[in-house]
Image: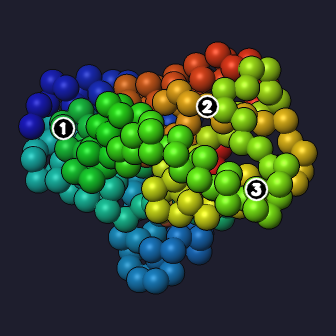
Amino acid sequence: MDIAKLKTALAGKSGARLKLWMEICARCGLCAQGCHFFQSDPIPEHVPAYRLKPLAELLRKKGEVDEAFIQWLVDVAYGTCTMCQRCTMFCPHGISVPFLVRATRSLAVSQGLTPKGLADGLANALSIGNNLGITQDEYLETVEWQLEELQAEMPDAKAPMDKKGAEVMLTFHPRDIKFYPQNLYGYLKLYNAAGLDFTLTSETGWDSTNLGLFAGDDAGATEMCRRVVAAGENLGVRTVLTAE
Ligand code: SF4
Ligand code: SF4
């Protein structure tokens, strides 16, 4: 455990929104209605506001905590929240619990404690371009394959690649490319039927997921965003559509 890094990371958690939400949470528990963890197992630890406890304690103790505390923080921040935002819909103050969970996760990242599955996916995304490690050839072949399938149904269907000046650039969840290519078929069918002026990108910015954001890894999140923006700007599109 590196207390100095933890304190540095904690010092970054000083934004007005974070401070306000941490202070105004009334512990009323109304958010519990929205959380699928609580609905399936209604224990106090599954009330969304409980996920604020590690950050509140850390702020109160100014980073002076031990390893057992950090392990508890990791368990709370990563173990029982999918960051789905449903609880926010039930909060009378509009507090975004996942925003605060993400801030908590970034403190775990400062200790090198990103859970392995997330860390591996992010490493794939940063080194290969997407979190499932799909090669660029596999991606391009899958698009071509699904377009051919679609053209049997819609002979004029297109899947323009790197079309400059298109209105919209499509991005995909890598899962749709690797495991569910029928989803790609569906997207292409929909966009062709709608007459959308769209393009795909052959650059690494086609991955619409951002495991850096999900993991609480600020540097990784920034880089993943940068790639999507760069791909869109290179093509001169007006809009980027993300899929989930
Ligand atoms: S509903 Fe909002 S104010 Fe109430 S406990 Fe949940 S996060 Fe806090
Ligand atoms: S964001 Fe987390 S705490 Fe809120 S409803 Fe979803 S899983 Fe539950």
Residue in the foreground of this view, choosing between 83 and 116: 116
Q: Which mark is residue 201?
A: 2
Give left or right: position of 3 versus 62. left
Q: Is residue 131 visible?
A: no
Residue 123 vertical placement versus 79 (above, below) = above
Determine which residue is flagged by label 3.
151
- Which residue is rendered at x = 13% and y = 30% of the image? 3
Determine which residue is flagged by label 1.
112
Between circles 1 and 2, the one closer to the viewer is 2
Q: Quadrant of the C terminus?
A: bottom right
Q: Which mark is residue 4?
A: none
* CB contact under 8 Å: marks 1 and 2: no
Q: Secondary structure at mark 2?
A: loop
Residue 133 is situated, as x and y percent measured from the top left of the image, at: 35, 44
Q: Earlier in the sequence, mark 1 or mark 2?
A: 1
Q: Quadrant of the N terminus?
A: top left
Residue 58 is situated, as x and y percent measured from the top left of the image, at: 28, 41
Q: Is residue 205 visible?
A: yes
Give me the C-alpha separation between circle 3 and circle 2: 20 Å
- Which residue is rendered at x = 59% and y = 74% of the image? 33
Residue type marked 3: Gln
Residue type marked 2: Thr
**Location of residue 218 (image quadrant):** top left
Between circles 3 and 2, the one closer to the viewer is 3
- Which residue is rendered at x = 53% and y = 70% of the image? 35
Residue type marked 1: Gly
Residue 106 is situated, as x and y percent measured from the top left of the image, at: 34, 37
Residue in the foreground of this view, choosing between 120 and 8: 120
Give me the C-alpha separation between circle 3 and circle 1: 48 Å
Residue 135 is situated, as x and y percent measured from the top left of the image, at: 39, 40
